[in-house]
Amino acid sequence: MARRALGRLLGGIPVLEEHGMSYGVSKRWMTSSTSAMWHNVDFQQQQTVGGTMLAGQPTPETHPYLMSPGDVQPGISGDEFRQRRRAFSNAMEPGSLAVLGSAPMAYMSGIIPYPYRPNSDHQYLTGIVQPDTLATIDSEGVFTVYCPDPSEFRDTWTGPLMSREAAKEFIGADEVHYVSEIPNHLARQVNAAQRLYLDVHANTPQLLSADHWRHALGVIHKCGTKTVSSLNSILHTIRWKKSESEIAHMSRSANIAAQAMMECMRSTRPGVSEHTLSALFEYQCRLQGAQRMSYPPVVGSGPDACTIHYSRNDKRMEENSLVLMDAGCEYFGYCSDVTRTWPIHGTFDGPGRDVYETVYEIHQTLLEQCKPGNTLRELHRMSINLIQKGLKSLSSRRGVHSLVDNRASYRTFYPHSVGHWLGLDTHDCSGVSHDMPLESGVILTIEPGIYIPDDSMFGEYRGIGVRIEDDVCITDDGPLVLSSQIPTKATDIERIMKDAMDA
């Protein structure tokens, strides 16, 4: 009654509850009783508009310039998604059930949302790239989707989400229910299962703010003790090796990032701000079809190149120093992650060139070792040895003995891993060990670097930071560098910048 009274005081505007779940600017306002009410009106029967199925995301009918018949996502067919689910269910223990939910909406302030970003595991198995949906897959391969309840309010403000018809005919679900039906239908599924596979982060407050997760976790809690296993324990091993369509998407993502970064090289001058390069990179990526950045771009000039994840990007670049850019984009969910370092005034000089050439040689050596059978951990150990030798060479070249004071000193100049898995997430497949032997179809980054603190004890090298990072696909015929369109050789970078400055 208090809610209704408050609604009347606000001129009939629905009261927005504390937790958000809807797709767009509005927050959840329907209670469970109002949700159930929609089941008794004709609105729930509206599965199409103008003969077009309500899918809440691109389909071959609505976006024929992006998708071919049979695609569930651009460039990825429904058959591939069925193969993924089959591989996943075959890896599950008999009599088990996996519960996967879409990512909830995140809000920057009040009802102002961040752009929606799907949960990678949910997207990989279902092809659904919108909020407010839950999916289950059992060990027999039965695929169930719980789609959003009809909401005229939501449709008015942010557009329709997936209908039951679309979940069945477009996504390929075997069974379809509304989110409001989770307490009944999911309870029967959970009670019949001997083991549950669940996202290890499923109890975070952000997930509990969404109706589909709150209903699902409530059901799991009420059903008593069950053996619960991490979803990632089997799914990340499947996601680790990429299909041909995934490699094509990641190659396109890396190419977009490479072209955008070359535009940043061409636009670099003393006095230009780091923010300008960051904005230019994002603009160029989006112009070429990327949907979002893989992560906030790093544009660190001068000594800030030594801060690994520097993201303030708020200084003007100065002459006679280097700028390090670490940036990538997402192309239909698939990430690129590329780093280059270049001279702000167009030419590598003196100690800056020494450090750059050292990292370049290390990077080239490591690329050659990206082949089946080696492991990421072995590549990292190799990078440590190479960097220690490189520091020794730099030290003797300019008499800076503080670079090699002790064996452990490399951590001061190289504090991160040589790489990570890459895919639907920038740091992909966290459940896969770095000791896993590389196989054809695996994609990883190779990113050695040397970062010399801005301290007088390091003489002419003080404040120089260099990292070179490429996205590499393992093949039986040798490494395929997806980001090779942007050069790493110093003379090639200088040529790009000279041509731009002379134009």
Image (spheres, rainbow, N blue to C red):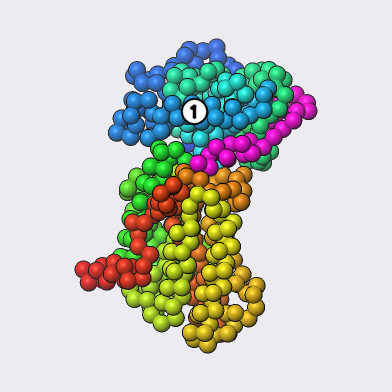
Q: Name the main secondary structure of what is drawn in magenta.
A: helix
Quadrant of the image occupied by residue 418: bottom right
Q: Is residue 451 left or right of residue 252?
A: right
Position in image of residue 130 (x %, y %): 49, 33
**In the rendered image, the vertical position of residue 467 relative to residue 106, given as above or below:** below
Which residue matches tag 1? 83
Position in image of residue 219 (x %, y %): 70, 25
Residue, x 44% and y 38% (percent of image)?
243
* Amino acid of disc 1: Gln
Residue, x 43% and y 53% (percent of image)?
479
Name the quadrant of the C terminus: bottom left
**In the rendered image, the vertical position of residue 55 relative to residue 262, given as above or below:** above
Q: Is residue 361 left or right of residue 63?
A: right
Residue, x 45% and y 32% (percent of image)?
158
Magenta segment: 215-241
Residue, x 47% and y 22% (percent of image)?
172
**In the rendered image, the vertical position of residue 33 relative to residue 18, given as above or below:** above
Q: Is 217 included in the stretch rendered in magenta?
A: yes
Position in image of residue 160 (x %, y %): 45, 27
